[in-house]
Image (tube, helix red, strand yellow):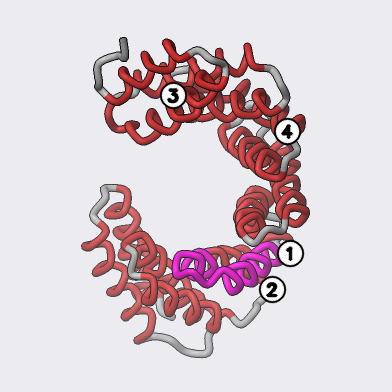
Amino acid sequence: MDSPTTTLIHILRNRVNELVANGDLDEAVHAATAAVLKAQQTLTSDLDSIDEFASSLEVRGDVYRQLGRLEEARDDYKQAIDQLDSRPDRCLQLGRLHAGYGSVHDQLGNSERAAELWDQAIHYFETAEPPARLDIAAMSNNLAYLKKAAGDVEGAEAQFLKALEILHQELGQDHEETAAVSNNIGALYQSAGFYEQAREMHMLALDARRKLFGDTHPDSAQSHNNLALAMLATGDKAWARRHFEKALVSFESLGIEYAEDIEAVADNYIAFLREEGDDARADEIEARVRGAAPAV
């Protein structure tokens, strides 16, 4: 491929990135398509021309996926993978392509195919030099969700713990992504009835999120609610009550945008208060959240 053509394709792909960053996805599709067509026009058996074509397909596939045009994204990812044909020098890109391809199938409801593709993505990310460890963690987290949904608690735990180990090593305990996976493991343990383990994982997530964001942040509020539920299950009702209060106040401070979260926390808290016989406080919370007058 000649240098001027390569330069034009790169200019077009850079334009796509700028348009996506500015939220103009519709125009980004046009720029991405122009790059794909130009790369296709000059496509030969030369590896450089194949790389430019596959990279342009990847860029357009990403934009299609963001727009929800999933069938078109799927076709672009598949064609790019076919072009690269398992080349050992393109492991990182093949990992990205399989990751995106898997996400499309996940969104289309094809969970088994999504799992296969994410497994392949992990293989390519592990084979890359150096291995793309944060990408491996992301794929392991995705696979864990699929296994959890299928009722495979042990399989989900193994994938979540793999992601957590990598994030601890690469980013540290007090990082947003590490906290998110700790929260995910806590939710898995809670649903499986492993309440002591759930409590500790939610505590780790909350500690990190409070350091990162403070209490008046949706992630911190979520962790307060999750920890409250875990503490109830381990018999620590006094602390559960405190965390329900913090979760509710935090979500309320964030405004109407979090109305569904406010209602979900309130439902949990009100149920707890009524079980404890504190109907007055339950009525007060219900009135505050639902906008009704308190019961007399």
Mark 4 or 3: in front is 4
Q: Main secondary structure of the magenta part?
A: helix
Q: Kindly indicate the quadrant of the structure image that contains residue 279.
A: top left
* Farthest-out residue, bottom: 45
Determine contact: label 2, label 1, CB under 8 Å. yes
Could you say which disc has been placed on residue 195 in the image? Answer: 4
| Residue under the image location 73 percent in, 33 percent down | 195
Q: CA distance from mark 3 to mark 2?
A: 43 Å
| Amino acid identity at mark 3 | His
| Amino acid identity at mark 1 | Thr
| Amino acid identity at mark 4 | Tyr
- Across and down, in percent, residue 61 comes to 40, 69
The residue wearing badge 1 is 127
What secondary structure is found at the residue carrying circle 4? helix
| Disc 3 residue crowd, few under 14, some 14–19, many 20+, Cα 10 Å | some
The residue wearing badge 2 is 88
| Amino acid identity at mark 2 | Pro
| Disc 1 residue crowd, few under 14, some 14–19, many 20+, Cα 10 Å | some
Residue closest to the eye, 216 or 236: 236
The disc, 3 or 1, on the residue closer to the chain's N-terminal end is: 1
The disc, 2 or 1, on the residue closer to the chain's N-terminal end is: 2
